[in-house]
């Protein structure tokens, strides 16, 4: 039975969820094909019987980049209201409730498919990254409901595997060892579509050496492609990170968690007849070390499906019993306590279950390990003032849990380790915020949230727009330790207000500075048509700032009106 699975993914999460759904179906009655929404021939939708949509929401309630063409088509007003009357559909949204437009695309797509005559296969699923168990809390339950509904329509035949019961089926790939030592330079880039290998020209720490947070201004040279890699303030750059050598050695070195020669050349071939897998295989001979360095995300926290799959390799009774327990839906609390709360990595799980790890077949590595996802960074440089350069402000992630070793961010730690002329694979994406050319802008960016506003301030000044048309609210802990770009603001002639939370006994945050300027802000917004932009950490800052503006505006509907016409925009991250 054919089931089409279409995803709209900005950072790779929706693609990974879709890939897991396809894996669950392998060997069952259901033949699942998966692709990005914009790679699907949308006119074929009218002929499909069952389609599952997995989609995220970006920026200010916009579809992901690989869903934009589909979105434009499906929202056309001239589509017949019965054109999808033969379609059964399910929609799973992946979102973050700290955003104002939480799961906006999934909600709107669900209603649109209904309005075009589609029949609901399963209720709308809305996963929230802010949940203590992450998106899995909803994804797992929704997935079970999907398979149970499909099985109720198409009962299981004798000898056919059930997609509800997670069992091991045929591997995704076949492999062959190669004896000739041919070149395998730039292996990583066969996984990616069109990255540019930008040379690192700067890796400057911009926080005081005694400050707990290491933040870097990373500078990349794009002068050779400056006309092709055009960006605007508010845009983001995608960075494809690598695993650090000592972590790769922990997986493949003397301990040999994976008992294979790490430097022997291998070629991979897909066993999928229709080549409909969401996994991108290396297109040339490579080594296990290169794959572990550039592709396998073994430093992430494992999801439930990882434990499910790993349990099938185990021949040790004790390890198998524990893995089965961690992989069951009923084991959510224990899995959260073991993996999620302490942020235990896949590498550390394999070390705990080393007898099972040694049984993982090489053909299964693309099944069991998720791919390293690219990271998005707001661009901190101005395309005019910093022509030929691309700069990002990176807070190096490092923190303690109850585990002995500190937790480290894969991408930020890798970037901080780079030396001049090291290459960084990057590509551009349109950002979620856009700045007006001449109207007054009120920019609120505590911490690294200041990055896109530094870009905007430089660009406005470089293009002859007076700096006084820009009001900036910046927040840090101490003026002596983490006041980013301190020496630049005076030259930019902006109206700068700084909240240094630890420079006095009573903590002062950006919302307090905004309140102090309440009358002036109201005048700018009501009389001069000023726009408000907020960027930074998504914990409590965006809500605190918005509450302050609601006090200033003295009307909820005024703020809603500003949001609807994109005069109040926010770009936040967890």
Image: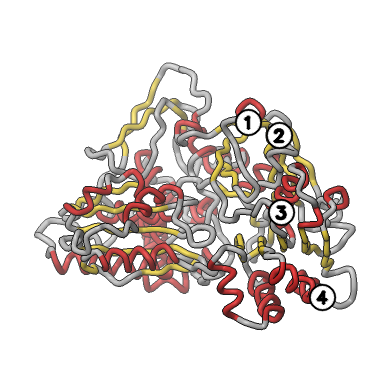
Q: Secondary structure at mark 4?
A: helix
> To which residue does mark 1 refer?
226
Q: Are marks 2 and 3 in contact (CB under 8 Å)?
A: no
Q: Residue at x 63, y 32 (%)?
A: 198
Q: Is residue 349 left or right of residue 480?
A: left
Of labels 2 and 3, earlier in sequence is 2
Q: Earlier in the sequence, mark 1 or mark 3?
A: 1
Q: Position of residue 457 (x, y in %)?
A: 75, 50
Q: Which residue is mark 2?
A: 387
Disc with the residue nearer the chain's start (3 vs 4)? 3
Q: Disc 4 designates what residue?
A: 516
Query: Secondary structure under badge 2?
Result: loop
Residue 518 position in % (x across, y down): 77, 75
Task: Check disc 1: other Cα within 10 Å, few if <14, some if 14-19, many if 20+.
Answer: some
User: Going 68% across and 75% down the picture, which residue do you hit?
Assistant: 549
Q: Which one is nearer the viewer's eye here, 9 or 142?
A: 9
Q: Mark 2 or mark 1, which is nearer the start of the sequence?
A: 1
**Gap in Å between the C-alphas at discs 1 and 3?**
21 Å
Q: Is residue 189 above or below residue 512?
A: above
Could you give the CA–CA distance between mark 4 and mark 2, rounded to whole angstroms?
37 Å
Q: Which mark is residue 278?
A: none
Q: For this view, does 408 lie left or right of residue 33? A: right
Mark 4 or mark 2: whose residue is earlier in sequence: 2
Q: Decide if residue 143 is on the left or right side of residue 483.
A: left
Q: Residue at x 57, y 35 (%)?
A: 425
Inspect this view and state whether residue 395 appears.
no
- Give me the C-alpha separation between circle 1 and circle 2: 7 Å
Above/below status of 338 relative to 184: below
Q: Earlier in the sequence, mark 1 or mark 4?
A: 1
Q: Are marks 1 and 2 in contact (CB under 8 Å)?
A: yes
């Amino acid at each position: 039975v054919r089931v089409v699975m279409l995803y709209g993914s900005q950072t790779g999460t929706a693609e990974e969820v879709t890939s897991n759904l396809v894996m669950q179906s392998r060997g069952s009655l259901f033949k699942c094909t998966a692709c990005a929404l914009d790679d699907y021939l949308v006119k074929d939708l009218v002929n499909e019987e069952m389609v599952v949509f997995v989609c995220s929401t970006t920026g200010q309630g916009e579809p992901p980049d690989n869903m934009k063409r589909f979105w434009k088509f499906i929202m056309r007003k001239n589509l017949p209201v019965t054109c999808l009357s033969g379609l059964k559909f399910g929609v799973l949204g992946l979102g973050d409730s700290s955003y104002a437009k939480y799961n906006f695309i999934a909600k709107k797509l669900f209603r649109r498919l209904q309005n075009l005559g589609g029949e609901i296969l399963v209720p709308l699923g809305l996963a929230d990254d802010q949940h203590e168990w992450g998106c899995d809390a909803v994804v797992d339950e929704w997935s079970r409901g999907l398979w149970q509904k499909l099985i109720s329509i198409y009962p299981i035949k004798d000898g056919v595997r059930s997609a509800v019961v997670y069992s091991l089926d045929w591997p995704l790939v076949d492999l062959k060892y190669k004896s000739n030592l041919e070149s395998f330079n730039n292996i990583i880039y066969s996984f990616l579509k069109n990255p540019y290998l930008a040379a690192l020209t700067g890796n400057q720490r911009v926080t005081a050496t005694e400050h707990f947070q290491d933040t870097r201004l990373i500078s990349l040279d794009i002068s050779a492609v400056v006309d092709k890699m055009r960006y605007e303030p508010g845009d983001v750059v995608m960075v494809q990170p690598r695993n650090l050598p000592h972590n790769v050695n922990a997986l493949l070195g003397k301990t040999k968690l994976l008992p294979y020669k790490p430097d022997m050349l291998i070629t991979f071939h897909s066993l999928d007849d229709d080549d409909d897998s969401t996994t991108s295989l290396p297109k040339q001979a490579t080594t296990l070390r290169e794959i572990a360095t550039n592709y396998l995300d073994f430093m992430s926290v494992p999801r439930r499906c990882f434990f499910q799959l790993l349990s099938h390799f185990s021949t040790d009774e004790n390890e198998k019993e524990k893995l089965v327990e961690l992989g069951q839906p009923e084991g959510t609390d224990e899995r959260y306590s073991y993996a999620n709360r302490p942020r235990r990595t896949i590498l550390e799980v394999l070390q705990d279950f080393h007898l099972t790890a040694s049984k993982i077949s090489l053909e299964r590595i693309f099944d069991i390990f998720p791919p390293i996802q690219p990271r998005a960074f707001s661009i901190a440089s101005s395309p005019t003032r910093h022509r030929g350069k691309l700069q990002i402000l990176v807070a190096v992630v490092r923190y303690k849990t109850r585990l002995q070793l500190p937790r480290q961010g894969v991408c930020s730690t890798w970037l901080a380790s780079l030396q001049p002329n090291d290459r960084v694979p990057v590509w551009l994406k349109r950002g979620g915020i856009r700045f007006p050319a001449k109207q007054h802008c009120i920019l609120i960016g505590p911490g690294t949230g200041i990055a896109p506003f530094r870009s905007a301030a430089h660009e406005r000044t470089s293009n002859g727009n007076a700096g006084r048309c820009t009001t900036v609210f910046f927040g840090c802990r101490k003026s002596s330790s983490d006041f980013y770009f301190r020496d630049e603001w005076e030259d930019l002639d902006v109206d700068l207000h700084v909240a240094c939370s630890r420079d006095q006994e009573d903590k002062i945050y950006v919302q307090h500075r905004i309140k102090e300027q309440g009358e002036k802000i109201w005048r700018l917004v009501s009389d001069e048509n000023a726009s408000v932009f907020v960027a930074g950490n998504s914990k409590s800052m965006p809500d605190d700032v918005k509450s302050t503006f609601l006090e200033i505006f003295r009307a909820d509907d005024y703020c809603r009106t500003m949001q609807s016409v994109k005069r109040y925009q926010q770009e936040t991250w967890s």
